[in-house]
Amino acid sequence: MGKSGKADWSRTLGSAAALFTSYFLLADWGLRWATVRGAGSPVFPAAGVALAGLLLGGRRLWPAVFAGRLVEFLVDGRALPFWAQATIAMGNALAAVVGAWILERVRIRLALTRLRDVLALIGAGLVSSAVGATIGSVALASVVAHAFAWAPVLWLNWWAGNVAGVLVVAPLVLSWTRSEPIGRSLRWWLQLLLSTVTAGSVAWLIFGPHVPRLPLAWAIFPALMWGALAGGVRGATTAMLPVAAAAVWGTTAGYGAFATLADHFQLVLLQQFVAVAAMTTLVLAVVVDEWRRGEVLRENEERLRLASRAGRTGVWTWNLTTGRTFWTTEACELYGHRGGCMVDYERWIESVHPDDRELARKTVNEAIEQARSGGSGPHSYKDEYRVIHADGTVVWLESSGAIEYKGDELVMLGVVRDITERKLAEAALHESEAHVRRVLDNLFAFVGVMALDGTLLQCNRAPLEAANISAADVLGKRFWDCYWWSGLPEAQARLHDAMARARRGEVVRFDVTARMAGDSLICVDFQLAPLRDDEGHVTHLIPSGMDITARKRAENERERLLKSERAARADAERASRLKDEFLSTVSHELRTPLTAILGWSQVLRRWANGKDQDLHRGFMAIDRNARALTQLIEDLLDMGRINSGKAHLDMRAVDLHDVVALVLSSVAPSAAAKQIQLESQSRPFSGRVRGDPNRLQQVVSNLVTNAVKFTPSGGKVQVTLDRVDGDAEITVTDTGQGIKPEFMPYVFERFRQADSSTTREHGGLGLGLAIVKNLVELHGGTVGVTSAGEGMGATFAVRLPISDARTSGAEEVCDVQDLGGIAVCPVDDSRRRTG
């Protein structure tokens, strides 16, 4: 015997033992009210346990009922022959078997959820109770003298007790063991408890000693109705139990309305009352339960209808035996039959798209054949096809369902759903995937998919064509064993290391050498990235790479050029530095003889004054040109100091009004000589800055002198001092020859002049504006120039930060001295002298 057989026998023996025990105990308790030799009783709840036990465990448990009744006889020592005892026991067992057989034939639901179930239980209880009462009465009449005279009364007592036991106990056992799960809300349990307690209390009052013997048995029905309405069948059967117990106890004790009747009718009529109360309460409970389930069913059907309409889903059935079909409104609409619904197979197949019709027909026919040849179990099927509506609209439908036998009839139940949007999305996805595939195939880069063990699963076409190999040559192989890395152990080692890191979740990127067609080698910018699932686990690796050989060559060439450029720049800077050193040395050496020339020219000019006018003019020319040469030398020395970082600034608070005024006063004679109009405009409190007053005077002097030099006779030079955005701004505007646009970027460079020819009209080294720019920047300011073009004049603007300091005893605005007209005799420490 297998394990399953042993388990079945174990369950059967356990059920039989439970039925034997419960039947024995209830039979022993009920036979206390037996009337003839302890055999027949108007109170016999064991009949209900016997019927419920056979319904739950099967009719094969009848020996447990027989044994329980026979053992009860033997234990109590009834004064009956053994054959009579065995006959009565067999009659009780047969009664339970007959009742169970009847209920199985009508296919009762053991949970008693339908009215037909309750009515069938009542009918089966009446019939089975009569079987047991008849066999028992005949057996007793056969052994007891003059018992046939009492046989009708004995039969009635016996039958009433069995009926009451069946109607009170059997529904209680069945409803609590085969109904829906026990778990309920606290409110339901509270109502069940209150209704049961109320029913028991009312029964105790009616059948107890505190109320006169009045016909008040009807008063129990409101309490029983509460139990039926609140708890359904479970509530009704639970409330009925204390009522039956209280009624039997009170009537036996001589209380209640039934105690006033003759002794042999008291319990009979009481049990009839109990049976009627049980039947009434059960019928009410099941009717209420059906009504509630109907309401829930209607609500669910409405929800299903709304869900079907919202989800574009329909339901249909087809009885293959009778040919009857049923289609919901939603199903009809999905097939394009708004005015009416399809009723047969042919109309359905005509609605299917011609391209899908044969496959749809084949799918349904195969499912039907499998159901007909495969037994009684359900056979499912599923298909997708297109249907054409009357207006020409094509809709994709998914049809699924099951085919099974319902009795002798083969029935197909199906659900149809609109999947047009899904199909369109799938088509778009397929097109997108194809587009991505085409893009990847035409992309001159490597893109692929690898398993975690390094097996190459997919790759695009470009690297295959570049290496002149096919997909079959690489797919399914370990990535490092593919052609691209053959004979390159260093590349293979780096790939091994990269895969180990990528499996841990890292993104690895490096340059690696790869082999292409003709054994040529290229440099690849390679990346290996992990591909994760929704939970973050690495499932695949994504290798990608791009040929950067040309870029590497370009980078190498650029590096070579950069090195060459840096070397050339260093040479240029060294040459410039040597040039500056040379100019500084030459300028320094020129100052010694030039000092002697200036000194002696002044002495000779004073000596010749008034003696010889030609000689005096000659000395004046010598003095003037010596001074110009001195200024050139000073410019060279200034530029050398600035470039070497040795320029010294004596920083203090300076009022730019005074600086501008002194410069204008010194330049005024030369401007007047050329008949140039010299103007000045300033804004109060806008010119106090921190700087070197002599250097700032040099800046303004250079700008104004240049303006006068390059402005023709009759022109105009305007100097403006203003405050702009928190800075002091000095602008020098002239109506001179202007600046060419192509020369604008070089205005402030050293040794750069717009006219650099040897025949130029204006002399100079081209250092003045370069010195201006450097001095302004040393003061933290900026200088700029604008010009409308050649012959349109120019404007130079110097912006310096305004000082926040106020005049104090420790720092005052310096007195800027006018240097114009002062004869200066420079002194040099050189030992060279002129006699």
Image: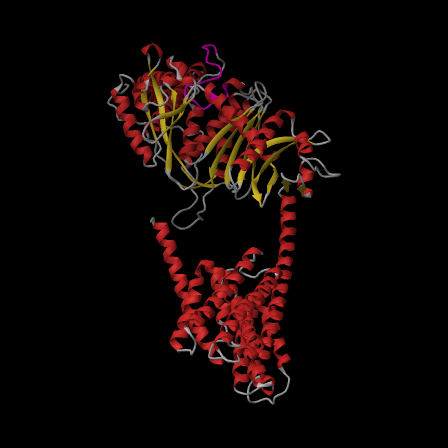
Using residue 60 as the reference point, say whether residue 417 is left or right of it: right
The range drawn in magenta is 743-759
Q: Nearer the viewer, residue 668 or 282?
A: 282
Judge from the rendering whether residue 423 lies leftward or rightward of residue 516; answer left or right: right
Q: Does 572 appear above or below 691?
A: above
Residue 747, magenta (yes or no): yes
Q: Nearer the viewer, residue 598 or 374?
A: 374
Residue 516 on the magenta segment: no
* Relative height, residue 31 to residue 543 (above, below): below
Residue 785 is situated, as x and y percent measured from the top left of the image, at 51, 27
Q: Is residue 452 visible?
A: yes
Q: With respect to residue 507, does 738 lie above or below?
A: above
Question: Where residue 756 appears, x then y in whole percent?
Answer: 46, 13
Q: Residue at x 44, y 38 (%)?
A: 816
Residue drawn at point x = 57 percent, y = 18 percent: 790
Q: Quadrant of residue 588?
A: top left
Q: Nearer the viewer, residue 658 or 376?
A: 376
**Relative vertical location of residue 624 with respect to residue 783 in this rendering, above or below:** above
Asked if residue 724 shows in the view, the reply is no
Q: Position of residue 673 (x, y in %)?
A: 54, 22
Q: Position of residue 755 (x, y in %)?
A: 48, 14
Say left or right for 107 vs 607: right
